[in-house]
Image (tube, helix red, strand yellow):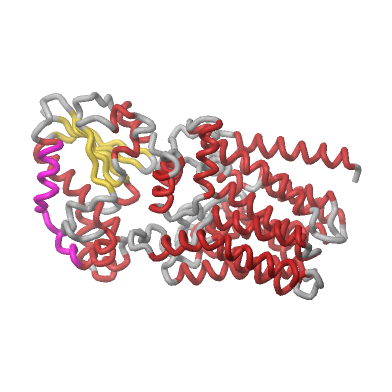
């Protein structure tokens, strides 16, 4: 194919991919929890406060450094922060083009262009190109590492081995569990390139250098995995349905397992009364095309396909087993490193069909279904609302005519979390919080949060049934009841994903051994606190309204 024509087509793909990523990039709901934490860490004073913040978090440091540089060069408005993910998302389209060209003798500009297109219209990648998180940059780094791996498989020269090692280090510095991907990638290259004469001389030497360079990263990983401050909240329990949702997330425009998938895959197809034709059509048609193409690619079984299979299966099974034992959440995004490999395998298989007409038909159907869904569907990745967005409760309070003399109590998140969207509400002396970082109202003073989470379900079971809580009553008297004046309002801002149980449902949960054991401790705590505050406030004040939107609910009480 003529080079000018190739670059013209690539340019069109890049522009189209960029436009898809720009649709609705200004999220009116604001950043949600993980995005907000990413921003808070990145804006910490460099170097002391910055690295202290990184070490308190469970994620690797590279992305925070990248975001800090981005904010210094541009700004930290929500749109600017989201653009920091859009840029690597677009660059990934270019890297996937070059990756497609690295397939070997059968590689062509056409293969590169198909790989770039697949990347450009991927709902999964479009979603994270609008998210202030690590995943867009991580995909880019993983695709670059895959280029290095294929070059090393073809020719394990000093240059290619060095490229492989450096790209591997970047992946590990970007993602805490990136070492799992790098481990299987390295093993695969060792197995399938070891027969080449240059391999031992350059690659093994490079790995030794990498090991020395990796020592500081290893210290960080050890701190994350064994530091007693880190613990799981078990907000997304494992289900075997997630094994299937992993593939529909990656190979269809329908995203399900972004934060937590339904426990049943079949329930997405048929709810017992109706067939979900939207999911059935838009999830299964692209998935079927992708799986057929991947199976076709597997039958080629050259060294590159073997590398892709061993690396992908190794990472997938490792995360699967770790999820079974409760060590990690089985979310699609946690395995985004193998996404470039799976795209490459699907493209490799699609382009290997001898019948050009079949390639064109399958590719066209995949493209049309995916793009139509992205542009039209209410479940499009660019239309999915960050339901936890922390501008939502701020906007709700303003709509409810909040004034400075009103009292506000935020549940679950500390009030400082909302300062980006309303400093006057967050910093008001009349605003207080009961956050997930402070269980003063249920735990002993000398008990650590780790101990509370580990032993709390047994220790505080009776408390969840109690109507008396002196510390919580004192808090409410001090911050609300004793200071509220006639005509003023008390707003209880409730984060509904963790306050699932009404007093009646909570009682049933606590008194049923099986239900109690399966219920996350966090949900018990905040359901209890919410129920207690509402009950007390209804006695002393007048409940005038309850307003809910997305993940937020606000109880409005008045002093009459």
Asked whether residue 497 appears in the rendered view, the answer is yes
- Looking at the image, which residue is at 54% across and 65% down? 243
Q: Is residue 399 left or right of residue 441?
A: right
Q: Which of 2 and 257 is in front in this view?
A: 2
Indicate the position of residue 4 as horizontal and vertical percent values. 87, 38
In the rendered image, which quarter is residue 301 located in? bottom right
- Looking at the image, which residue is at 57% across and 41% down? 85
Q: Give the range drawn in magenta.
A: 459-479
Residue 557 against residue 354 in the figure, above or below: above
Indicate the position of residue 511 as horizontal and vertical percent values. 20, 66
Residue 196 against residue 371 in the figure, above or below: below
Q: Nearer the viewer, residue 240 or 338?
A: 338
Q: Nearer the viewer, residue 408 or 36?
A: 36
In the rendered image, which quarter is residue 50 located in? top left
- Looking at the image, which residue is at 43% across and 44% down? 41
How many numbered discs sit on the rendered protein? 0
Indicate the position of residue 464 as horizontal and vertical percent values. 18, 58
């Amino acid at each position: 194919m003529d080079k000018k024509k190739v670059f013209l087509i690539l340019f069109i793909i890049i522009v189209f991919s960029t436009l898809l990523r720009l649709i609705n990039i200004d999220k009116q709901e604001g950043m949600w929890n993980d995005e907000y934490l990413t921003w808070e860490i990145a804006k910490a004073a460099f170097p002391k406060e910055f690295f202290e913040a990184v070490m308190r978090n469970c994620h690797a440091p590279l992305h925070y450094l990248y975001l800090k540089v981005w904010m210094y060069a541009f700004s930290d408005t929500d749109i600017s922060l989201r653009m920091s993910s859009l840029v690597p998302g677009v660059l990934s389209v270019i890297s996937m083009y070059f990756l497609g060209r690295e397939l070997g003798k059968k590689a062509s500009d056409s293969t590169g262009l198909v790989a770039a297109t697949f990347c450009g219209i991927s709902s999964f990648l479009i979603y994270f190109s609008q998210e202030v998180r690590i995943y867009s940059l991580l995909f880019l780094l993983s695709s670059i590492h895959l280029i290095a791996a294929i070059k090393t498989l073809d020719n394990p020269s000093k240059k290619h081995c060095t490229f492989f090692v450096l790209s591997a280090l970047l992946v590990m510095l970007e993602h805490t569990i990136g070492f799992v991907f790098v481990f299987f990638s390295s093993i695969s290259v060792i197995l399938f390139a070891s027969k080449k004469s240059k391999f031992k001389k350059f690659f093994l030497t490079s790995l030794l250098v990498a090991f020395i360079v990796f020592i500081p990263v290893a210290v960080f990983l050890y701190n994350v995995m064994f530091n007693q401050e880190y613990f799981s909240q078990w907000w997304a329990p494992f289900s075997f349905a997630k094994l299937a949702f992993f593939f529909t997330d990656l190979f269809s425009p329908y995203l399900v397992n972004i934060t937590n998938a339904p426990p049943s895959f079949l329930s997405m197809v048929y709810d017992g009364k109706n067939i979900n034709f939207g999911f059935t059509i838009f999830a299964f048609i692209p998935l079927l095309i992708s799986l057929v193409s991947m199976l076709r690619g597997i039958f080629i079984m050259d060294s590159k396909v073997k590398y892709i299979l061993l690396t992908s299966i190794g990472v997938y099974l490792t995360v699967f087993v770790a999820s079974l034992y409760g060590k990690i959440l089985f979310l699609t995004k946690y395995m985004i490193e193998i996404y470039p490999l799976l795209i490459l395998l699907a493209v490799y298989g699609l382009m290997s069909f001898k019948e050009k007409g079949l390639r064109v038909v399958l590719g066209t159907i995949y493209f049309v279904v995916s793009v139509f869904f992205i542009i039209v569907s209410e479940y499009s990745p660019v239309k999915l609302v960050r339901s936890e967005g922390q501008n939502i409760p701020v906007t709700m309070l303003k709509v409810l005519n909040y004034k400075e003399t009103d009292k506000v109590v935020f549940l679950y998140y500390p009030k400082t979390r909302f300062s980006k969207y309303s400093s006057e509400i967050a910093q008001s002396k009349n605003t207080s919080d009961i956050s997930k970082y402070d269980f003063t109202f249920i735990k002993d003073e000398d008990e650590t949060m780790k101990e509370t989470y580990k032993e709390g379900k047994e220790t505080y079971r009776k408390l969840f049934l109690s109507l008396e809580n002196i510390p919580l009553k004192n808090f409410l008297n001090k911050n609300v009841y004793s200071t509220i004046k006639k005509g003023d309002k008390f707003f209880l801002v409730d984060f509904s994903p963790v306050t699932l149980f009404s007093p009646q449902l909570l009682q049933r949960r606590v008194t049923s051994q099986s239900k109690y054991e399966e219920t996350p401790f966090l949900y018990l705590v905040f359901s209890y606190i919410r129920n207690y505050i509402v009950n007390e406030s209804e006695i002393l004040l007048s409940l005038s309204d309850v307003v809910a939107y997305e993940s937020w609910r606000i109880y409005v009480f008045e002093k009459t």
